[in-house]
Image (spheres, helix red, strand yellow):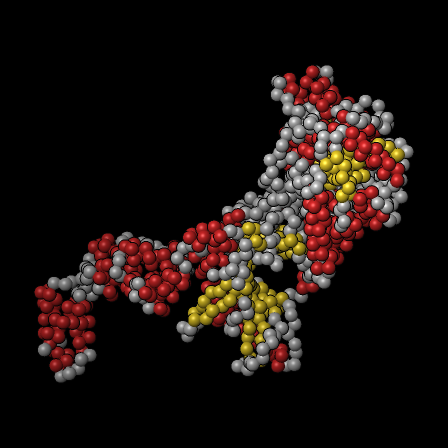
Amino acid sequence: MARSLTQIRADLDAGRYSSVEISQEYLDLIERHNPALNCFISITPELALKQARAADERIAAGDAGPLTGIPLAHKDLFCTDGVRTSCASAMLDNFIAPYDATVVERLRDAGTVMLGKTNMDEFAMGSSNENSHYGSVTNPWDSTRVPGGSSGGSAAAVAAGLTPAATGTDTGGSIRQPAALCGVTGIKPTYGRVSRYGMIAYASSLDQGGPFARSAADCALLLQAMAGFDSRDSTSAEQAVPDFGAGLEGGIAGRKIGLPREYFAEGLDYRVAAVIDEAIAELRKLGAEIVDVSLPNTALAIPVYYVIAMAECSSNLSRFDGVRFGHRCEDPVDLEDLYKRSRAEGFGAEVQRRIMIGTYALSAGYYDAYYLKAQQLRRMIKDDFQQVFAQVDFILGPTTPEVAFKIGAKTDDPVSMYLQDIYTISLNLAGLPGMSLPAGFVDGLPVGMQLIGNYFDETGLLRVAHAYQQQSDWHLREPGLVT
Amino acid sequence: MSDWETVIGLEIHAQLATRSKIFSGASTAFGAPPNTQACAVDLGLPGVLPVLNREAVNMALRFGVAIEAEIAESSVFARKNYFYPDLPKGYQISQFELPIVGPGHVYITLDDGERKEIGITRAHLEEDAGKSMHDLFPEQSGIDLNRAGTPLLEIVSEPDMRSAQEAVAYARKIHSLVRYLEICDGNMQEGSFRCDANVSVRRRGESELGTRTELKNINSFRFLERAINFEIERQVDLIEDGGRVVQETRLYDAERDETRSMRSKEEANDYRYFPDPDLLPVAITADDLERTRASLPELPEQKKQRYIDELGLSDYNAELLTASRDTALFFEAALAAAPGQCAPLANWILGDLGGALNKAGLEINASPISPEALAQLVERIADDTISGKIAKEVFEAMWQGEGGADEIIEARGLRQITDSGAIETIIDAVIEANPEQVEQFRAGKEKVLGFFVGQVMKQTQGKANPGQVNALLRDKLK
């Protein structure tokens, strides 16, 4: 039975086992099961045990915080000092980061133990974790299916019980969608809540880092350490971080939850819809008032997102040029050859596709029609949400239109892949916080429901999720893959 | 040539004198070993983010206020995307549609004394790239990223200049201004003040602008003038021969005194500008502007006017003294030590001191004679301790480091002889020894007086007070 962070904390404090022992246990599980799941790109046993020993000393000295000695895994998008940071790309296969991302630094200072770096879609571009230089990750519930992406490795590792917690990043749904497909809990905070320093950029105005765990309560613990203003990130919000844990209890009686009709329209698998309907009924029983609302510009979200994300990433990925670090082609004959071959060899197909489309969208003659237009429409999407939040406290819907699909099913059809993000993408554009939590199953495959909150109301989201999780056990189910 | 009119605009990149870079905390100090002043942010490592150095903004504001420009309440940083090894991120953070400083102006004084207004279109903040060295390694280029991330203020003029001289006058004006404002050290050799010229020609009377070329690699005012003149001639010759000017970038070759086409792929670049999502817009409040205005030093225009109005200096001298802030401050320090000696001090500084500095290749700040020391010398002339002529000898000795004016006068016994009795005695001797010349003088040859003065001076080693000598001689020769 997979342990929660609260449980591990209690056990460590009571001396039932040490951090070294529990970390070693997870390391053994990873060694045994990673070959089949492929959730980890790098495993760091020496570093982990060193950190675990330090944590045990703090615990013995009575100096432990909520996360001291807790093992976790970092998505391989976060720079980790002295440890390979690959972004699942051949381009960075040889890149040892010379510094820690703020997220990594804060979780390290909180006493966590890093087990390793998790697999992902290359440079965070994907919704299935099939775009990795190190091979696909398989869904722990069904090895013929995808775990979702881009944070597929983190979601699968938590679902399989290889780690009790993991970090991820979310630009268009990359925490929420894999959380849904793997049956775990994940939260994308408000844009600016978590520092992007050291989080290798995909789309700068959309990226946010956040935690995966088995419950809202666990996520609250992790988010507490991760969140907060960072002077090294100019887009970091100077917003005070509330005590997320203290905000969990209290219930949701009288809270208004909106259901956007656009999220329950065609394209949604009817069986997934049925699971969500039951979850809604459960929330009603808990005292929430359910309101019909509308987000009329939902359909625009996908083209707007992709224009903006691809434009920004085409610029963000220019630094990968074979000059200072990363992959460099052999025997370049001149500068142009150096650039062209290093980048052609270093980047996978999806990354190259997005760079080209992004470059096109920003180019002379097209900037106004695509990028500028997309930013204008983005404001409309943001306004849609503000109108709805004038009426309700939270928005609810399915996280994804269908459950985990078969590996390879969508790789020939990029647009069909992009449509996986239809429910998650809008709130990255608006900068709002969103969570996915397990709501049930369809044919033995997990279904996630998505909660969206107003700016900086992660506390509210966690409270709703926690209330739901007190009355249901979907989040506690395990694939039974791993012993 | 007078059928043709030249249109010139200048783009000046001034490296701002902040201690650290515009988007990181690395040092901007010149001369460090390669790649020792480039931190993770400057290197464009994965995951790093820019953080704005507010001092660069303050310096841009000072410039904007000094040129009486419109200052943007909110300006935006944009990415200028292109690939080159000395540009680590593959884009330069600059400003495009919304620069911090809008239209402004400066005034230049032409050779004939006429004043002309030169418009400045805009000035914006951006980061500098690193340096590429193509000659250090065989078959390879070396990249030094120390310079990457240094703040630049790009100052774009209107195409208001009509000759190389006007362009140089404008460049000098901006150079002087940024030094007055203490926002840039203006060192063209070290690359902290770079001038690029946009030059085009058209037949007189035409309203449309000709195709322009951009001239780069100009690192002195002299070369600026030469490069522009070469280019004007080249373009006119080209058009008169039936050719067409190609819009291109041309490098100035100082050795050959010519401009050459760069012909690089960079010509074809589409920079795909878009607002940098990692940075917030720069907000400037009315308070910021007030504080900036209040903190400005007296600017060259005001100072020059004050020298004319309050100190009674000529326009010409005032212009020369205020052209460089260091010269003006030297003058003011000397004046403080010798109040009332404006004109003599101006003449000494612009004349003897200026000449000596030029010859030795020194800046006025490195002058071996301090403002106070010069002031003392001038006072000694004013109080008749020494004559103007002897003062030149004293100046020489001071320049060689022999001490202050009083010390030298004492040591060398250079005090003026003002004792009429002593002078009369010498005059009597000279008159007696030169009866012919006495006759000539009495016969009406005025010029002979000079001979007598010379003789008296010789007898006194030049120390007799010339005024007294003249008066007493006339008296005795009657």
Q: Nearer the viewer, residue B27 or B31?
A: B27
Total count of labels: 0
Q: Which quadrant holds the C terminus of chain A?
A: top right
Q: Residue B279: x and y, percent?
A: 61, 48
Which residue corresponds to the image point at 19% horizontal and 64% vertical from the top-left?
B463
Q: Residue at the top extreme?
A: A15
Say which of A334 and A43 sits in front.
A43
**Closer-to-camera residue (B416/B123):** B123
- Percent x, y of residue A232: 60, 41
Residue at 86% from the left image edge and 36% from the top image edge:
A274
Residue lying at 55% horizontally and 80% vertically, measured from the top left: B204
Left or right of B20 on screen, residue A437: right
Relative to B453, A237 lies left or right: right
The quadrant of the image that shows the N terminus of chain A is top right
Residue reaching furthest bottom? B443
Query: Residue B306, percent across and down?
Result: 34, 62
In this rendering, the answer to whether B233 lies above or below B95 is: below
- Residue A148 vs A114, above or below: the answer is below
| Residue A257 on image: x %, y % | 74, 37
- Please tell me in which quadrant of the rendered image residue A208 appears: top right
**Placement of B241 over or under A311, stated as above or below:** below
The residue at the point 19 percent across, 75 percent down is B451
In this orientation, does residue A42 appear? no
Q: Is residue B224 visible?
A: yes
Foreground pick, A197 / B220: A197
